[in-house]
Amino acid sequence: ELRFYESRLVPISLIYLIATALCVFNRLFFCTPDKFGPYDYGSENACRSTVIGLGYGGTWLTSLIVNILQLQAWPIGLGVWHISYYTWFSSAYAFCIVCYPYLERLFVGREKPGKLVWTHVWLQVIHLATLVLMEAVYLSRKADTEWVNYWVWGGYMFPPFWAVRFACGMFLGLQFREYRPHEKVSAWIWGVVTDTITLVCLVAYVLMIH
């Protein structure tokens, strides 16, 4: 497992740290101590304290620690600067990689007939449960816009929720490895099916924006 983690996490972590360093350099220029302001929900000024309410140095320190350790997708990330906005997914992805060996052991043998359907059912039940949880809490607290904003933001990034989706794709990959549908005579049918799904989604999107 150590070799697996080393081969998967070290390369992306090096690239991630370089990108983060460049973003830190950029923020240091536009967010100087004299421009720093107190926390103000809804403000478009990025050079402000977070919901935690720390000063300039404290906000920088906590943000650097959380971002360097790739923890910004976890709830602690709600209280720091996202110095490199889109790298939150690196945090979620790293957690999925950590889960991979354990999920693989869990799925071994379940791609066989009998267990296959029920494994899919339980994966989708867990997946839908995460969505229902997010929506139910949102609807129960939607009058408090600040609270629900952090709830939705934190829930969208939350790595265990992404791990569920990762597990769904991973199990599907194990099925492909087991049954090798691309090597069968009827493989062209699935090409037509996927192209049709793509076309339907494209038409639905066009109709939706109009």
Image: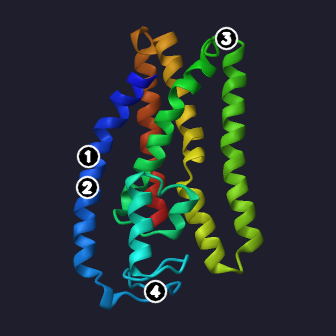
Q: Which residue is mark 1?
A: 15
Secondary structure of residue under mark 2 = helix
- Residue indicated by mark 2: 19
Q: Are marks 3 and 1 in contact (CB under 8 Å)?
A: no
First in sequence: mark 3 vs mark 1: 1
Residue 178: x and y in percent read 51, 11
Name the front one of labels 2 and 3: 2
Kind of element beneath mark 3: loop
Task: Name the front one of labels 4 and 1.
Answer: 1
Q: In the rendering, at what x and y percent does residue 72 appear? A: 47, 58
Going by the numbered disc 4, the residue's amino acid type is Ser
Dot 4 and dot 2 residues touching (CB under 8 Å): no
Distance in Å between CA atoms under marks 4 and 2: 26 Å
Between disc 2 and disc 3, whose residue precedes? Answer: 2
Q: Nearer the viewer, mark 3 or mark 4?
A: 4
Q: Which residue is mark 3?
A: 113
Q: CA distance from mark 2 to mark 3?
A: 45 Å
Q: Is residue 73 visible?
A: yes
Name the spot of residue 183 as percent of width and height, x first: 40, 9
